[in-house]
Image (cartoon, rainbow, N blue to C red):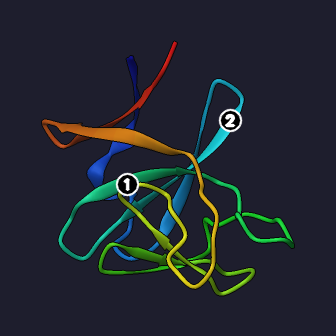
Amino acid sequence: MRYYHVGSVELFPMRLGRVVRLNDQQIAVFRTTEGKLYALENRSPGPKGGTIVEGIVAGEVLYDPICDWKIGLPDGCVLPPDEGKVRSFLVDIRDGEVYVGMEE
């Protein structure tokens, strides 16, 4: 696992997402009102496709802006009654700086 620096905590607004690019992948980083950060592949799991970065965060759930599905931020799993999954990535915060972990 390799961790990539993606910016300072202040760059990630609460309850919203921000896209970072790692190894030619778009990763959406979300910050909860409690200050916890999560990183998911910026891809809607719904049948219409699209991206999730414009979704709204409530607690540890992301509301998909395309199909109105609920996605669990910790694991990227779509909540019932819908089904699906988005790839999730580990996030580490060190001295106010954010790092996203990816397999090499």
Q: Where residue 52 sits: x, y (%)?
A: 64, 67
Q: Is residue 39 above or below residue 58?
A: above
Query: Quick one: label 1, few (<14), some, or many (20+) residues within 10 Å?
Result: many
> Going by the image, does 12 lie left or right of 102?
left
Q: Which of the 4 quarters of the picture holds residue 20?
A: top right
Relative to residue 103, is residue 50 depicted above or below? Answer: below
Cβ–Cβ under 8 Å for marks 2 and 1: no
Which quadrant holds residue 54?
bottom right
Image position of 16 with respect to 84: above or below: below
Say which of 83 and 54 sits in front.
83
* Residue at 41%, 54% in the rendered image: 75
* Gap in angstroms between the C-alphas marked 2 and 1: 16 Å
Residue marked by disc 1: 38
Quarter that holds the N terminus? top left
Report which residue position mark 2 lands on: 25
Q: Badge 2, how many Cα within 10 Å: few under 14, some, many 20+?
A: few
Residue 49 picture location, percent across and down: 83, 65
The residue depicted at 30 percent of the width and 71 percent of the height is: 32
Q: Amino acid at mark 2?
A: Gln
- Residue type highlighted by circle 1: Tyr
Answer left or right for 74 relative to 66: left
**Which residue corresponds to the image point at 68% horizontal and 35% vertical from the top-left?**
25
Viewed as shown, does residue 52 lie left or right of 56? right
Residue 30, labelled with which disc? none
Q: Answer left or right for 65 relative to 63.
A: right
- Upstream in the sequence, badge 2 or badge 1? 2
Q: Secondary structure at mark 1?
A: strand
